[in-house]
Amino acid sequence: MSDPIADYERAADGFAAELGGCEGKLDAPSPCEGWKAQDVVDHVLGNTTGFAQALGGEVPESGDDDPSARFAAARQALIDAAQQPGALDKMVKGPLGGDVPAGVLFGIISTDTLIHTWDLGRALGHDVELDADLLQRSWDGIKPMEAMVRQPGVFGPAVEVADDAPFQARALAFFGRQA
């Protein structure tokens, strides 16, 4: 069984790497329909901040306009809060309104951060190779919840892709992305 905090850190590392190259490019359109790179950043930062606060963490206010610095602070607050005894067993509001164990939400947030790493990278013109092990765990974890993730406001419809396409392309297609 994987460590949800370690998985989140791996996803956050990738997102932070893409975020570090975004200066002056946040108006670029993203693969998320109707979103720009800035919307992807705001979404991931909002999820990270909200989850940290739900676990009792405090995200320091930053007067800094640097999205990398804001993400680093929110990410650290989330990790610190999640490492508190019993934090991952705490019930928190899930993406569709019901309560779920924080450990389950951590898997969802890790997957969201991972997939949005690809979105941000593509918006910035980068060819992003996602962490293959984490992508496999994300796929395995979300696949049984397909009915939930196909609801409006979660993931879009799956995209058709050849059965023999590379795993990343097939996984991204499941998450509604065309690689």
Image (cartoon, helix red, strand yellow):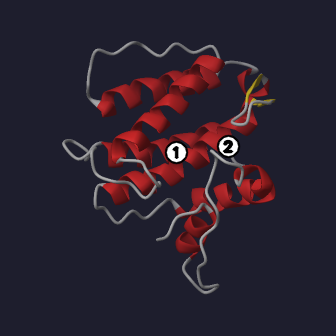
- Mark 2: few/some/many CA within 10 Å (<14, 14-19, 20+): many
Q: Decide if residue 66 is on the left or right side of residue 131.
A: left
Q: Quadrant of residue 54?
A: top right
The quadrant holding residue 167 is bottom right
Specify the farthest residue to the left: 24
Q: Is residue 6 something one can see in this rendering? A: yes
Cα–Cα span, label 2 and label 1? 10 Å
In percent of width and height, residue 99 lies at 80, 28
Estimate how packed mark 1 is, as few (under 14), some (14 to 19) or many (20 or more) residues with alpha carbons within 10 Å.
Answer: many
Label disc, if present, on residue 107 of the rendered structure: 2
Q: Is residue 114 above or below residue 6?
A: below
| Residue shown at 33% from the left, 56% from the top | 123
* Amino acid at circle 2: Gly
User: Helix, strand or loop at disc 1?
Assistant: helix
* Residue 1 visible here: no
- Mark number for residue 113? 1
